[in-house]
Amino acid sequence: MPTVFSEGGFRFFFYSKDIGERPHVHARNGDGEVKIWLDSFEAKRIRGAMKGEDVAGAVTIARRRRDEIVGKWEEMVRRGGLT
């Protein structure tokens, strides 16, 4: 699960097993992990107890960097996963 980028105390990354799902990115900080869908910016807590304001912060970053994340997602899908 290589890092797409780090910002604001979060590490944004993909899981290659997720390529069959609609585009999304995972964000992790010291409190937990969320999954953020890039079409709706809906976030789902995956692990830990990330605070609501941290979830909102991760969503804000993902929204601002959406084009970059989608480009990396498409690159991963073209390769058939992560290398």
Image (cartoon, rainbow, N blue to C red):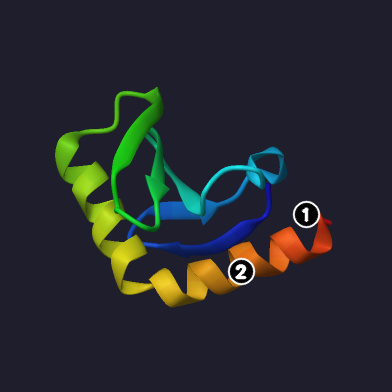
Residue 22: x, y in percent? 52, 49
Mark 1, secondary structure of its residue? loop
Rendered image quadrant of residue 64? bottom left
Q: Is residue 82 left or right of residue 18?
A: right
Q: Is residue 67 left or right of residue 58?
A: right
Residue 63: x, y in percent? 30, 66
Q: Residue furthest top?
A: 48
Residue 48: x, y in percent? 38, 23
- Quadrant housing the C terminus: bottom right
Residue type beneath disc 2: Lys
Which disc is residue 82 wearing?
A: 1
Q: CA distance from mark 1 to mark 2?
A: 10 Å
Q: Nearer the viewer, residue 22 or 26?
A: 22
Reading the chain from its start, which is encountered first: label 1 or label 2? 2
Which residue is pictured at 68% across the width and 54% down the height? 2
Residue type beneath disc 1: Leu
Residue 52: x, y in percent? 17, 37
Which disc is residue 72 wearing?
A: 2
Which residue is pictured at 65% across the width and 43% down the height? 20
